[in-house]
Image (tube, rainbow, N blue to C red):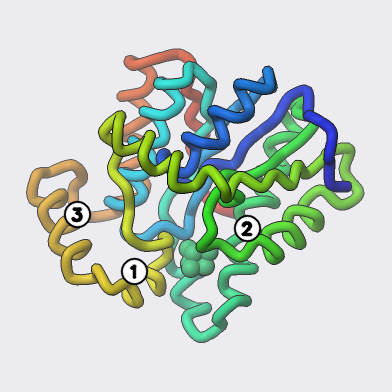
């Protein structure tokens, strides 16, 4: 069931910090009880996953909303779908939205949605389809917000608070297809040199690294150290 009325308690899948800005402005203005949910195993490489996560944490802090973090960067599944075109994106939406639905049910939310709805570059029809499937036969609603008219405003707001704004969608395929590929690769190399992360087993180390960091930072952030099913 999709939901046109306002949810009471919304679990909002968050693809990155900048895309969360405008949806949060609107949802909080409407008085909705919203919790962010960062689950994006599509993001490659792990250092980029880490970077986007840190930006999402900044946004949660900026708006004073709780955030749940799950999983890590697991690009292999996306690499296997390199030739699948739109079906790779369907898989990507399905993977993330079904996980949001599981978490929402476990934690007593009545609705889910996603910040992907702010981006004019995402496939809205596929997101709607996969969101509908994620909540099928569950006592849960999928809120089909359309925040695309605030995309530019959200990006400007992200710039104003100094957020990193990525130049590719997230998976290894979108990275290779990006016209900024060389520049992005140089940035990733630079981040690695700075020692944000060590080289072996990046993703798991990133999770462990941040768990300690967040525990010290705030009790509003809950880290679930689980692999993608
Ligand atoms: S292009 Fe974006 S939506 Fe499509 S599979 Fe890659 S990360 Fe996911």
Q: Report which quarter residue 184 is drawn in.
A: bottom left
Up-down: is 129 above or below 23?
below
Image point 74% across, 57% down: which residue?
A: 128
Outermost residue to the bottom: 83
Q: Whole-Å distance between the Cαs marked 3 and 2?
A: 27 Å
Looking at this view, is 229 or 101 the one in front?
101
Q: Measuring 57% from the left and 73% from the top, which residue is drawn there?
A: 88
Of labels 3 and 2, earlier in sequence is: 2
Can you give x and y, in whole percent of width and height, for residue 100 in the image? 66, 43
Dot 3 alpha-carbon crowd within 10 angstroms: few under 14, some 14 to 19, many 20 or more: few
Residue annotated with mark 3: 199
Side (left or right) of 181 relative to 8: left
Distance, label 2 to label 1, CA atoms, is 19 Å
**Relative depth, front residue between 216 and 96:** 96
**Residue matched to label 1:** 175
Does residue 196 appear in the picture of this structure? yes
- Secondary structure beneath label 1: helix
Quarter holding residue 92: bottom right
Q: On screen, 120 above or below 215?
A: below
């Amino acid at each position: 069931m999709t939901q046109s009325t306002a949810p009471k308690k919304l679990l909002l899948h968050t693809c990155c910090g900048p895309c969360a800005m405008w949806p949060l402005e609107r949802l909080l203005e409407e008085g909705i009880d919203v919790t962010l949910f960062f689950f994006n195993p599509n993001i490659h490489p792990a250092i980029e996953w880490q970077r986007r996560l840190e930006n999402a944490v900044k946004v949660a802090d900026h708006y004073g909303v709780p955030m749940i973090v799950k999983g890590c960067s697991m690009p292999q599944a996306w690499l296997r779908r390199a030739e699948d075109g739109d079906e790779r994106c369907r898989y990507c939406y399905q993977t993330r939205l079904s996980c949001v639905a599981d978490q929402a049910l476990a934690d007593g939310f009545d609705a889910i949605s996603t910040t992907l709805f702010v981006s004019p570059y995402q496939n809205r029809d596929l997101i709607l389809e996969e969101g509908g499937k994620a909540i099928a036969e569950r006592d849960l609603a999928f809120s089909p917000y359309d925040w695309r008219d605030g995309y530019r405003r959200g990006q400007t707001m992200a710039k104003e608070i100094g957020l990193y704004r990525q130049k590719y969608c997230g998976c290894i395929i979108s990275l290779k297809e990006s016209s900024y590929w060389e520049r992005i690769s140089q940035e990733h190399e630079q981040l690695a040199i700075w020692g944000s992360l060590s080289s072996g087993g990046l993703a798991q180390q990133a999770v462990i690294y941040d768990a300690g960091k967040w525990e010290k930072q705030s009790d509003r952030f809950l880290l679930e150290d689980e692999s993608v099913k």
